[in-house]
Image (spheres, grey):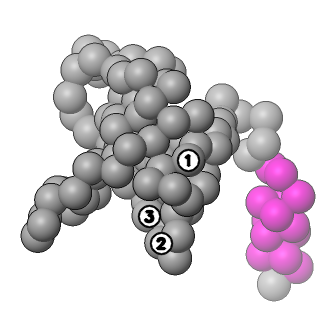
Amino acid sequence: MPLLGFLLAVLVLGGFSGSAAWAVSEQSYLCAGDTLVATAHAGAVDAVGIPNTSAGTAPGAFVVLRWRDLSLQLPRSNSSGPPSYSDGKWFWGVDDPEHPRFSLLVGSRENFSCSR
């Protein structure tokens, strides 16, 4: 048990904080009149040989979006080009960092206007 406690302490106190594989980038936007905070995580992936690595992300990376009463974790899509993230229901695209694309893809299919 002491070893387990030590390992948990290392994780909690930032054992991974210096690792590029766990790098985090947070940005704030205004989407449809409400603040949205997007936190991009590079994830614990080995991107060697993946042809569509873009902007420091690779499939396996993810973004967490906090907006209104939602907290969404969207995986990096396997598309080439600028990073985009989708779980099949929600979409987040950062081709234009000043005006990212945020959409609900099912049901009434809504696009939410966003700006930095």
Residue 85 placement: quadrant: top left
User: Which residue carries the number 3 mark?
Assistant: 72
Instruction: Classify mark 3: helix, strand or loop.
Output: strand
29 shown above or below 65: above
26 shown above or below 68: above
Specify the segment rendered in magenta. Answer: 2-15
Most foreground residue, 56 or 39: 39
Viewer-side label of 2, 3: 2
Q: Which of marks 3 and 1 is nearer the N terminus?
A: 1
113 shown above or below 106: above
- Give amino acid for label 2: Leu
- Dominant secondary structure of the residues highlighted in magenta in the image: helix
Drawn side of residue 104 relative to residue 46, left or right: left
Q: How crowded is mark 2: few (under 14 residues within 10 Å), some or many (20 or more)?
A: few
Label 1, label 2: how far apart the Cα atoms are: 15 Å
Q: Magenta stretch containing residue 10, yes or no? A: yes
Query: What residue lies at 84% left-to-right and 76% top-to-bottom?
Result: 5
Q: Which quadrant would the N terminus be assigned to in this image?
A: bottom right
User: Which residue carries the number 1 mark?
Assistant: 30
Q: Give how far across and how far down residue 9 sits, in percent.
A: 87, 67
User: Which residue carries the number 2 mark?
Assistant: 70
Label 3, label 1: how far apart the Cα atoms are: 16 Å
Q: Furthest residue to the left?
A: 107
- Give amino acid for label 3: Leu
Drawn side of residue 41 relative to residue 82, left or right: right
Query: What residue lies at 51% left-to-right and 36% top-to-bottom?
Result: 115
Do the numbered discs 2 and 3 sit on residues whose CB atoms are within 8 Å? yes
Instruction: Classify mark 1: helix, strand or loop.
Output: strand
Q: Which of marks 1 and 2 is nearer the N terminus?
A: 1
76 shown above or below 3: above
Residue 47 visible in the current orientation: no
Label 2, label 3: how far apart the Cα atoms are: 6 Å
